[in-house]
Image (spheres, grey):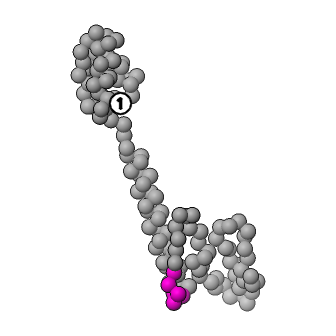
Amino acid sequence: MTAQHSDTETGDAVTQAPPEDGSSEIPSPSASDVPLPADVELELPADADDEEAAAIVAAIGAHLHDQARATAAAAAQTEETWEGKRWSFAGRVRAQQGEDVRVPKTAPTNAWTAAGRTDRF
């Protein structure tokens, strides 16, 4: 490594020190400076300069970030429903209370909360 680059020994991106000639210009990061997830392989064109490589890596990084956020949002929106459970819950109410009830689709999905509202079914 040159005096212009210092390796942080963390396995993450390589940090760069400013040049020794006194200029404030810091070289743009190259594709090897940006850590990628383990399951992602990235091949840059051989004729890509540092700016093109940085743009490619930034675009792919933004895409992966957006994809991860969309996956997390989809997982958070998955709510528990009564699908396939309403009849078994109605059977338990009949066995415990001796009454036939019809569990509405809008009933609370928490079994304890729903059990407290069986008088309204």
Q: Position of residue 98 (x, y in %)?
A: 28, 9
Q: Position of residue 50 (x, y in %)?
A: 56, 85
**Image position of 2 (left or right of 30):** right
Q: Does the magenta stretch include residue 4?
A: no
Q: Is residue 48 magenta?
A: yes
The residue at the point 46 percent across, 58 percent down is 68
The residue at the point 66 percent across, 84 percent down is 24
Does 86 appear above or below 4?
above
Q: Position of residue 3 (x, y in %)?
A: 76, 83
Does 60 appear above or below 28?
above
* Quadrant where the image shows the N terminus: bottom right
Give the residue pinned by disc 1: 109
Give the tally of numbered discs: 1
**Image position of 52 (left or right of 80):** right
Q: Observer-nearest residue: 37 or 8? A: 37
Q: Which amino acid does label 1 sit on?
A: Thr
Circle 1 packing at 10 Å, graded few (<14), some (14-19), many (20+), is some
* Secondary structure, magenta segment, majority class: loop
At numbered mark 1, what does the secondary structure look like: helix, strand or loop?
Answer: loop
The segment highlighted magenta reads: 44-49
